[in-house]
Amino acid sequence: MIVLTQKQNGHFKFSKTPDLLKNTAFIFVLLMLCCSLLGMSQAIDNSNYKDIYKLHIRKTDQKIKIDGELNEEVWQTAEMATDFWLKFPRDDEKARKKTEVRAAYDNQFLYIAAVCHDSLPLISFSLKRDSRLRENDGFGVVIDPMNRKANGFYFSVTAFNAQADDLLTAGDEFELTFSWDNKWYSKTKILPDRYNVEIAIPFKTLRYDKNNTVWGINFIRSDRKSNQFHTWTRVPVNFPGPDLGYLGALVWDTPPPPAGTNISFIPYITGTAKENKLRGQGLSGSFNAGADAKIALSSSLNLDLTVNPDFSQVEVDRQVTNITRFSIFFPERRNFFLENDDLFSSYGTPPVRPFYSRRIGLDDKGNTIPILGGLRLTGNVTPQTRIGLLSMQTAQKDKTPMQNYSAFTLHHRVWKRSLFKAYFFNREAFNGDKNKPVPEAEKFGRNAGGEFNYTNNKGNIQGWIGYHHSMKPGIRNQRMFYYFGGGYFGRQFTSFVSIDKIGTNYYSDMGFIQRILNYDAVRDTMIRLGYRSVYHNTELTFFPKNKKIARIELSLENTFIHNPDGSLNELAIEPSNTFLYNNTSRIEWGLSFNKVNLLFPTAFTDADPLPPGPYRFVQFNASYGTDNRKTLAARMEITRGGFYNGNITSLETRLTFRRQPKLTLEAGWELNALRFPQPYGKEDLVLINARFEYTFNTQIFWTTFFQYNTQNNNININSRLQWRYAPASDFFLVYTDNYFSNPLFKSKNRALVFKLNYWLNI
């Protein structure tokens, strides 16, 4: 164990903190200097990719059977894409394992065939749908039918034919969510020296201009055994593999056939048996029904409708221990809100998001509020302009009145990769009981704003600026939130700074603001207080050419938070170092130098709260992860050091056992031991979680979670069985049970739910 020797009774002593202006100026000067010295020579020129990487596709009259055999004549004569690049751990050499890709089409389908040369055994952690390609051996394809580097489609299969699909959007916050689900077909065949992949994508699944004969395309190969990622075109290591800015060209011999009418109707039925001992409610049962519809209004504009939606099949939230002074952001898991969610949720910065879809149909504790229905219109209205329109109506529940949540957003692409965005969000409350009108202050909450995100053609220089305004009854001042920043995002060097200012009266009824509410533990009340923040991050990456280390990363994060009057609220300086090894193991270590000026009494234990005032402390953290391709993998982390006027020891261990490709057992244990001088007490916060996952085949999946959390005084068991009995059609059976952790296993509530839906193309 490593123990820090610290000044002043275990606490780091800071010199006088520079003011906000000096911090900002220093960071900008450092940023520009580093960019000029290190950055400009690192970019990969992608301006002529459509000329360098071309794959011609021709129509076939031959019937293609999706069986992974690749024995049709068309696959012997079709043009081949090969000679892939390494994408990870480095991007400056060709992949050694050979991949061969061909394409064809008929009146109904776009066909992709791939031969991935490899030796046995192959790695596949799961047969579950939407398993991430990076964690398995497998193959993927990225398609941009409009050829504008703005939107696209992603399809992938593991070597064992577990499918995944998603919609792609260009932008600095690109992330695969796998929220999009549609009908397509695939089959793989594993041979001693290779595996074959055969994919058929219905033209109805895609949205495209039938007159466009050049599509953007790229192919991805995950070589998990070698811990490598390959791409057909050369994609910089600092960009995601499916990045739309680095696509080659799929050249059609004739315009692709029109997709025809694309309307999907997805009805569902559910049944529930539940018991709630906390409320004194015995066992009861109920049935419900609803439907979704997807209507393609044009080749690039889609309308989604939902009536009485149900999300009982969604995975339970992963519980966490919160030792901060503020609320924690939980990710959205409901697919209806995730599809095309970048149109709504990408505004703001990570601590402040004007749109947070969990505000719709969920209360602050994650309990459901019935949604009566809604619609979402998303897509392109011009080649450069995307729009999003959302309107959801919730029912009245207990003391919560009916609410309408509506949003309009516009994304307009300028130049090649830059983006202007604007939005208007509105929450409106209604009450069916005229004798109990909605209080004036709660009648509505509205937000409007705009942003401009600049990205150069190579994607390595970015800048951003945004202004947001809130509207609430009776509030007239300090209602703004604005920010600006920029930086260089290179292959080996990244550095950026972001500066935010949030007014005390900036509200976001449809959003998330992490630290504007401050809890006063003595008066037991929340106090709103705006703030100004400066966040800076610099990372330097090395790619050693040896057999053991894949990457070495050096990072420095600086966070400065100031009160509205300019006084310091909080700062954190966090240098860190990471070693990533070719066998997937990793070592990380770092320091965290902190200064906090508590404005209000704050309690971390059941004893007296800490008094307001300045606190200085330093922490050390280190973690080690073993080779996660092995049958048994482990990750361990320790944090040790000061914590306000006391000390903290955090220990975390996670073990994963896999019997691939069907069984995964995962167990984690976390302890946060807080020790303060008297009379501020001590606390041991324990979090235990376990996950059992068994995939019977590529259609049937069973997942069970167990979570024990002393901070929330809760034990949760959630078990979910999913049967994909037809393409995009599922049967779910979900059991959930909650108990107190103290007294141990005293029952709170439980429920058993089934849900059946069917995807019908009209």
Image (cartoon, grey):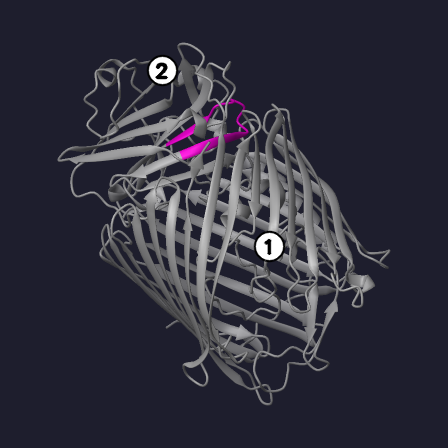
- Residue 239 in the image: above or below residue 606: above
Q: Which residue corresponds to the image point at 55% horizontal and 64% vertical from the top-left?
A: 366
Quarter of the picture holding the N terminus: bottom left
Instruction: In the displayed orientation, state which residue is furthest to the top.
Output: 254
**Disc 1 on helix, strand or loop?**
strand
Which residue carries the number 1 mark?
Answer: 371
Q: Is residue 150 magenta?
A: yes
Quote the CA–CA distance across marks 2 and 1.
Answer: 46 Å
**Disc 2 on helix, strand or loop?**
strand
- Residue 407 in the image: above or below residue 475: above
Q: How many marks?
A: 2
Quarter occupied by residue 686: bottom left
344 vs 64, nearest the viewer: 64
Closer to the observer: label 2 or label 1? Answer: 1
Give the percent coordinates (x, y) of residue 481. Answer: 74, 51
- Residue 682 in the image: above or below residue 97: below
513 vs 364, nearest the viewer: 364
State the extent of the magenta-drawn residues as a range: 141-154
Which residue carries the number 2 mark?
Answer: 57
Crowd around label 2: few <14 · some 14–19 · many ≥20 (10 Å): many
